[in-house]
Image (cartoon, rainbow, N blue to C red):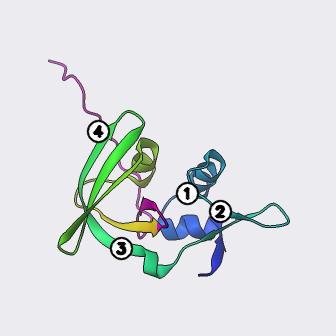
C-alpha cells in the first residue's frame, strides 16, 4: 500500500482538501506523520467497494449510510458533516473505504454541490 498526500487522498475520495485536513485534525482519519510534520494517508484498492447509496439517515451529528454492493448491503455510521460534504443521496454511486475496523464512505469522482433539502415543518 502506497502512502499518498492528504491532497491526493482527498481527490481520490471526492472530498475537498480542507474537509479531509479537518477530519485529520479532528482525529476522524488516521494518517502517518512524516519527520517534516506532513500527513500521509494510505488507501489501498483492495479496501474499496463500489456501490450505490440505498438510504441516508441523518440524526444530529451522525448519519447512517446504507450502500448496495452487488447483492449485499453495507451500512456505515459516519458524521452528518461527511454526508453533507459528499452530497450523498439515494441512487448516488459511492465507495465504501474499509480500513482496519473503520468503514468510510467516499464518492468516486467529485460532484457539483447540490442544494440540501432539510426535513422539517412545512409552511402553509
Q: Which mark is residue 49?
A: 3
Neighbours of disc 3 within 10 Å: few (<14), some (14-19), many (20+): some
Start and end of the magenta stretch? Answer: 99-124
Q: CA distance from mark 3 to mark 4?
A: 28 Å
Q: Earlier in the sequence, mark 2 or mark 1?
A: 1
Precedes in sequence: disc 3 or disc 1: 1
Neighbour tally class for label 2: few under 14, some 14-19, many 20 plus, Cα within 10 Å: some
Q: Do labels 3 and 1 touch, CB within 8 Å?
A: no
Q: Residue at x 22, y 60 (%)?
A: 91
50 part of magenta stretch: no
Whole-percent x, y for residue 106 in the image: 42, 63
Look at discs 4 and 2 and give the one toward the viewer.
2
- Local SS, label 3: strand
Q: Residue at x 58, y 50 (%)?
A: 23
Distance from disc 3 to disc 1, alpha carbons, whole Å, reads 21 Å
Pick out the residue farthest to the right. 36
Residue mark closest to the camera, 3 vs 1: 3
Q: Which residue position is annotated with label 4?
A: 117
* Rendered residue at 21%/75% (across/down): 70
Please state if 112 lies on the left or on the right of 4 as rendered.
Answer: left
Q: Is residue 108 left or right of residue 93?
A: right
Name the quadrant containing residue 59.
top left
Tell which circle, 1 or 4, labels the residue nearer the N-terminal end. 1
Q: Which mark is residue 16?
A: 1
Residue in front for this viewpoint, 79 or 19: 79
Q: Residue furthest top?
A: 124
Q: Quadrant of residue 36?
A: bottom right
Q: Which residue is mark 2?
A: 31
Density class for disc 4 (Cα within 10 Å; few <14, some 14-19, many ≥20) is: few
Residue 82 pos. (x, y %): 45, 49
Amino acid at each position: 500500500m502506497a502512502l499518498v498526500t492528504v491532497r491526493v487522498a482527498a481527490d481520490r475520495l471526492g472530498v475537498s482538501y480542507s474537509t479531509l485536513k479537518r477530519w485529520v485534525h479532528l482525529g476522524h482519519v488516521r494518517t502517518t506523520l512524516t519527520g517534516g510534520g506532513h500527513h500521509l494517508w494510505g488507501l489501498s484498492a483492495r479496501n474499496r467497494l463500489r456501490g450505490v447509496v440505498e438510504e441516508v439517515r441523518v440524526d444530529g451529528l451522525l448519519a447512517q449510510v446504507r450502500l448496495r454492493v452487488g447483492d449485499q448491503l453495507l451500512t456505515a455510521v459516519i458524521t452528518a458533516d461527511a454526508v453533507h460534504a459528499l452530497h450523498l443521496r439515494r441512487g448516488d454511486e459511492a465507495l465504501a473505504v474499509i480500513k482496519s475496523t473503520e468503514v468510510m464512505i467516499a464518492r468516486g469522482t467529485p460532484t457539483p454541490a447540490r442544494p440540501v433539502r432539510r426535513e422539517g415543518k412545512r409552511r402553509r
